[in-house]
Amino acid sequence: MKYTFLLSFLLSATAFAQETNSLGMKLVTVPAGRFYMGSEGEGEDYDEAPVHRVTISKPFRMAITEVTNAQYEAFDPEHKKLRSKAGFSKDDDEAVIFVSYPEAVAFCEWLSKKEGKPYRLPTEAEWEYACHAGTVTPFSTGRFLPANYQKSQKTDRTPVVVSLKVGQTPANPWGLQEMHGNVEEWCSDWYGPYEAGEQRDPVGRASGLFRVTRGGSHGTPVQYLRTTNRLGMIPEDKHWLVGFRVVQAEKPATQPLPAIPPKAFAQNVSQKPFAWKTVSASQPVFLEPIRYVNKPACDAGVPFYSHNHQPALTWCPNGDLLAIWFSTEKEAGREMTVVASRLRAGQTRWDAPSEFFKVPDRNMTGSSIFHDGTGTIYHMNGVEASGDWQNLAMALRTSRDNGATWSAPLLVAPEHEKRHQVIAGMFKSKEGWLVQACDADPSSSGGTAVHVSKDGGKTWVAPYTDPAKPDYKTGASGGLIAGIHAGVAQLKDGSLLAFGRSDNLPGPDGKPRMPMSLSRDMGQTWTYSPSEFPPIAGGQRLIFYRLNEGPLMLIGFTHHPEEPDETKKGMLFTDAKGNSFKGYGMYAALSFDEGKTWPVKKLLTDGQYRYLNGGAWTGAFEMDATHAEPRGYLALTQTPDNLIHLISSSIHYRFNLAWLQQKMVVEAARQ
């Protein structure tokens, strides 16, 4: 149950007095007073706690409705081109959308000069105070939000177009309309955690990555329309869910709270270059598998949920490994956050995870992290407009100090649309270009797109943008890699070779095979053919990687663990005596001739019996001489000492090329 608010306010003599400015905006006076800000912060609403008493020391005027198209375009006539984008907000009296935080601030500055009065965005505290309007319930209407306030209050993968006309809902007790829904509204604060204790005219944090938005929108579940619900966005982001309203008042002179301190993954990070010692090329190495997804302590304050999945991994110049993955209750959920953990140089246990990157109340599907070998670590992440994972923008950050600090997120693909679901596996081409693969569709098939940067990540180009899905089975060229979650590597002749999940192609025997795609123009067009490998399916993601030593390596799965047909389970492998045996689960294959043949195939087990838990969709499994992990989302890096580090959805494996080339001794491993 949410905290029961105690609210007190002092009504001024001018309470609820209205005025109309030169743009036709109607503003109402919000009285000075006190209220209790926030909630108990249960579950995904942890950022609403602690409840703290806030004094708003002076009355201020607030626009009764959100800024409309006509009002905004008096400042920026060019914005008219964005009317009806994504189908929304075509009329003069609809709430303006597709406005970034800097653009909203610029409007307020323009209006201040025009009117000779100070206009600005509300602080987060002013916004919540005005939304409560003397009430203590989740909505100003009570415990529930009536139907006449609601539009498409659910997570819509494809946005449902509704009218954004302002002034359509009943006013709250202080005369304000559409404080719950219609469009989210920018506030002036940097997003950051609340602090306990009584506060007077708070203005948020001194700095941050995201600006607060409030009120929820026309296309999100009702729970996000609550008075205390907190949202946020990258300041440069803009889409069909967010607009703003203004206040007329001087900005509070309060000193902001300090910037958010570093998370655990960024603390005590060594900046000493690591002295890598190359593992002997002839000495096989397979180290004991260890967990890298470890639950944080309950009092650590880390948002950590039941579903931990979709990892990415890189090495750092100081010898650390840095892994990131999403943690969520639902894969379409807005609670999804990206967490990180380090395996510090010389240590044998991964650190407890801490939050790595989270745009408040946005789905964060798709992460990639990559060290370019010269000191720069790149982090690319998807950022949804709301929930689900179809309407993603792509944000890039960089670090030059082993992941201790990161640049502000740059929206390198700012449109929230398909082809932006980031896949772990960014790499640098021989030309020095960065290549990032992204799922082209949110479904279980639909292909993979590539994005290329020729300037160190400053700008990115998707070489082929035809929205049509290719016909993979004809073998004709198309603009996407066959299969989602694709692994991509560059061949010595400059071509790109890729393998994917789904969109399977029939092999010579008519049985489905994992699709293989080849591009000779850096991803503009692809040709398709069946590989010799079995297809993979739900809960499985492959690896395709060029090893430091030169060979190409593919890691896949022999079959899906829920495959009902016994004849389709497993693959044949060769043991140390030259005998064939059937193995099940995760395997690696090596090619020494640029993907033409794959003479080495090895089940990824050392033959020892283990009971392990792969987390996420994998769960518990038994590992022995003929059984390896049955499924998982894979990510990989190879450190300068040539040790291969492979992570699944929960487990960290370590081995080298010599071990992959060593034939397995198959014995009865179970006791």
Image: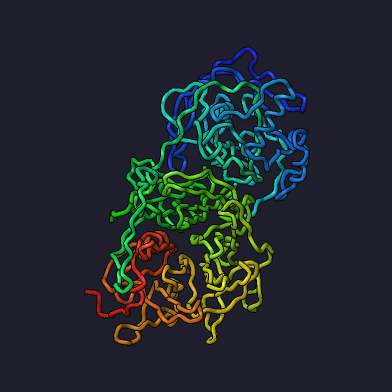
Residue 455 versus residue 666 in the image, above or below: above
Residue 355 versus residue 22 in the image, above or below: below
Please state, as top left, top right, bottom left or bottom right, where the N terminus lies in the image.
Answer: top left
Q: Is residue 477 visible?
A: yes
Q: Could you tell me which residue is drawn at 55 percent across and 24 percent down?
A: 134
Q: Could you tell me which residue is drawn at 62 percent across and 49 percent down?
A: 414
Q: Could you tell me which residue is drawn at 24 percent across and 74 percent down?
A: 670
| Picture coordinates of residue 314, whole percent (x, y) | 42, 57
Q: Is residue 293 visible?
A: no
* Relative depth, front residue between 579 and 90: 579
The residue furthest top is 13
Q: Give the quadrant of residue 494.
A: bottom right
| Picture coordinates of residue 477, whole percent (x, y) | 66, 74
| Picture coordinates of residue 155, whole percent (x, y) | 58, 50
Q: Give the quadrant of residue 49.
A: top left
Give the side of residue 76 with respect to residue 36, left or right. Answer: right
Label count reads 0
* Relative depth, front residue between 165 and 239: 239
Residue 383 versus residue 42 in the image, above or below: below
Please state, as top left, top right, bottom left or bottom right, where the C terminus lies in the image.
Answer: bottom left
The residue furthest left is 671
* Relative depth, front residue between 140 and 648: 648
Give the side of residue 232 with respect to residue 461, left or right. Answer: left
| Picture coordinates of residue 338, whole percent (x, y) | 46, 50
Q: Could you tell me which residue is drawn at 68 percent across and 41 percent down?
A: 97
Colouring chosen for the image of the structure = rainbow
Q: Give the quadrant of residue 11.
A: top right
Residue 447 versus residue 510 in the image, above or below: above
